[in-house]
Amino acid sequence: MSIDEKHIGEEWYTIISNKATGKIMLMASTKRQDELKSVSVPLMDEFRKKVKVATRDLSPVYALYCREVFPNAMQVADKFHIIRYAIEAMQTVRIRYRQKELEKRRKAYQQFKQEQQQRKEQYQGNGNKFKPKKFRYKEKRYVNGDTTLELLAKSLYLLFKYPNQWIQSQRERAKILFSLYPEIKTAYQLCCMFRQWYSNKNINQHELVIDKRLHDWYERVEDEAIEEILNFKSLVERNQQYITNYFINGHTNAIAENINGKINKFISSNQGTRHRDFFFFRLNNYFS
C-alpha cells in the first residue's frame, strides 16, 4: 500500500492506494492519525493485517498510522521524497550565497540613496538645481558572460544533474561556480554521494554493505560540517530504518505520485473543483 497527501481545492487529503492494482483504497479529507484510523479500520478490517509493505513520506502521522492499521507491514520511506530533501539541502547552500550577494547590492543601494540625499541638500543649500543620478551596481562578468548573481541563479539546474549529464555551458558555469564557492562544490559532492548510495543498483545488496556505505557518508558530512547538509544527515539518521528498507525490494511511492498526476488532470478537465460532489463522483468511478 502507498500513502500520500494531496491538496485538492482548499483542503488536504490522505490517499491510500494499492500498488498492485493502481487503484485508490481510501481517500479522506484529513491528515490526523486518529481520524484516519477511525475511518479506515472498519473498511480494511478483513485484510489490513495481510498488508506486507507500506510506502510513505516521512510524516510521523503516517508512521504511527501504519504501525496501528497495518501492524505486519514493513514501512518504507519514499525514495522520491528523500532525494528531494537531499537536493533541497544542497540548493539551500547556493541560495545562502546568493542572498549574501543580494545583501551587498541592497547595502550598495542604501549607500547610494544616502549619498544622493547629501548631494541634494548641498545643491539646494547652494541654490542650484539638483539632477539625480541613476543607481548602477558594478558587477564582475566572468568568461562565460555571467555576473556573480547570474552565476548563482543559473546554477540551479546544473546542480540537479550529475557531472556527466552537463552540457558544455553548464560545465563552464560549474567550473566558475565551484572555484568561487568551494562550499557549494562540497555540498554538491555530498549530495551526489548520497544519491549514488540510494541508487537502485544497490537493491538486494547485503544490509551490512548498505550500512557501511551510509556511515561512510555520515563521517564525510561530519568532517565537512556544512550546516544544511548536517540538518539533512540528521533527518536520514532519524529515519534510517525506513530509508534502508528500500534496498530490500526497491519499493517506492511511485504509484501514489502517478495517481496525484492523474488527479491533477481531472482537476484541469473539470476547470477546478467547484462542483465538488461531481468531481469526487468521477474520481470514485475512475480510481476506486
Image (spheres, grey):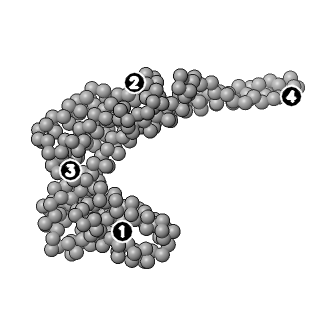
Horizontal relation, residue 235 to residue 163: left or right: left
Report the amino acid beneath label 3: Gly
User: Position of 143 compared to 236: left or right?
Assistant: right
Residue drawn at (64%, 30%), measured in percent from left and top?
109
Measure the C-alpha gap from mark 2 to mark 3.
Answer: 34 Å
For label 2, the residue is 182
Q: Residue at x 34, y 44 (%)?
A: 85
Against 100, residue 11 (above or below) is: below
Disc number lying in front (4 or 1)? 1
Q: Which residue is mark 3?
A: 250
Q: CA distance from mark 3 to mark 1?
A: 29 Å
Q: Cα distance, mark 4 to mark 1?
A: 66 Å
* Image: 36 above or below 92: below
**Tag on residue 129?**
4
For marks 2 and 3 on the same chain, the one whose residue lies earlier in the sequence: 2
10 Å neighbourhood of mark 3: few (<14), some, or many (≥20)? some
Q: Quadrant of residue 286?
A: bottom left
Could you classify mark 1 by the number of other residues whose Cα lies within 10 Å: few (under 14), some (14-19), or many (20 or more)? some
